[in-house]
Amino acid sequence: MHVAQVTAWDQAPKYISLPTPAPEPNEYLIKIFATGLHQVVRSRAAGKHYSVNTLPHVPGIDGVGTLPNGQTVYFSCFGPGGSFAEYITRPDAMVRPLPKGLDPVQTAALVNPAMSSWMALKARCENLPSDFNVLIMGATSASGRLAVSLARHFGASKVFGSGRNEESLKEVGLDGFVVLKDDPSETDWSALGHVDIILDYVYGTQAARLLTQINPKGRVQYVHVGSLGGTEMSLPGVALRGKDLVIRGSGPGAWSMGDMAKEIAGLLEALVSVGDQKVEIIKLEDVEAAWNKKGEGRMVFVP
């Protein structure tokens, strides 16, 4: 079979041949139909993610394929064997049938960015009010846009967002938004009002400014999900002493792969009602040339 393989952290994957894997008992041999080039896939392939530290490396953490009986399935593979390949073996716990009406290519593109907010809300938030309000920091990113839809799926009464581009924020379907200024000290959060949940894909100085400025009416659960605006945050102690603030993170380690596996079926069902997103389909054989390409939509590779 053919795979994309990384042999040096500073180089794009190369299209090579490897033996087709043989499934162990309780595993499926899956013929891969589509797999997404997510941000975490790029980070792992560059040796910049805590989950990968050995070479050679086959990129990819999930995808859509078919079983020997012809059934179309979604699979997860956050481990050594990646999905940028023609075939993969996966245990039953990491494989789920695709619900009726869910497009395979859209599924390959969306499950990973959608899983970030799904797990943040399901595994890292507690006792959500029936009509909770949520703020999505980074609402115009791919993950942020999906977080808006999924927050409403979970029963959010109002969904607010933040981002740098005001026109893009107007297109997301928010109940209100805050424009992030280039200088975080100029970002004005005073009109935000109370939110019960903050899902943060930005972090850094913008997040510190937010947590310092907000004046909530009750408990706020802040969940760090991504670091588009920086990897460190310096938070004044008064922000912790002066308000009822719960701070958590969400990602592998904050929850287990088993926790995630239990949520795949529910997320797939929820995605049926999410509109199609921009996707660019690329042949796996062109992976080396296309790897560093920047497009408007999520890149999905097909063998």
Image (cartoon, helix red, strand yellow):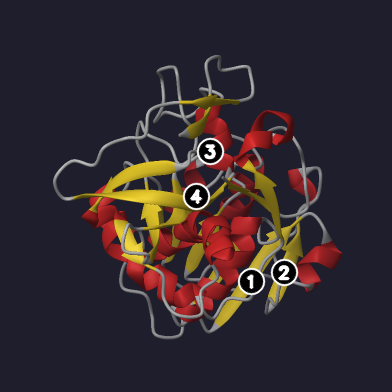
**Front position in the image: 214 or 160:** 160
Seen in the image, is 8 located left or right of residue 120? right
Q: On the rendered image, what quadrant is the N terminus found in?
A: top left
Q: Residue furthest left?
A: 25
Q: Which residue does the numbered mark 3 point to in the structure image?
A: 41
Q: Nearer the viewer, mark 4 or mark 1?
A: 4
Could you say where residue 299 lies in the image, as x and y percent from the top left?
66, 49
Q: Which residue does the numbered mark 2 point to in the structure image?
A: 177
Residue 278 lies, with reference to residue 81, above or below; the image says below
Mark 3, secondary structure of its residue: helix
**Front position in the image: 273 or 285:** 285
Mark 2, secondary structure of its residue: strand
Q: Which of disc 2 and disc 4 is earlier in sequence?
A: 2
The alpha-carbon separation of the residues under discs 4 and 1 comes to 16 Å
Q: Nearer the viewer, mark 3 or mark 2?
A: 3
Q: Which of disc 4 and disc 3 is earlier in sequence?
A: 3
Please report the residue visible at 45 percent of the width from the left and 80 percent of the height from the top.
100
Q: Are marks 1 and 2 in contact (CB under 8 Å)?
A: yes
Q: Nearer the viewer, mark 3 or mark 4?
A: 3
Please report the residue visible at 51 percent of the width from the left and 39 percent of the height from the top.
84
Asked if residue 232 shows in the view, the reply is no
**Front position in the image: 113 or 96:** 96
Asked if residue 90 shows in the view, the reply is yes
Q: What's under tag 2, amino acid-wise?
A: Phe
Q: Which residue does the numbered mark 1 point to in the structure image?
A: 160
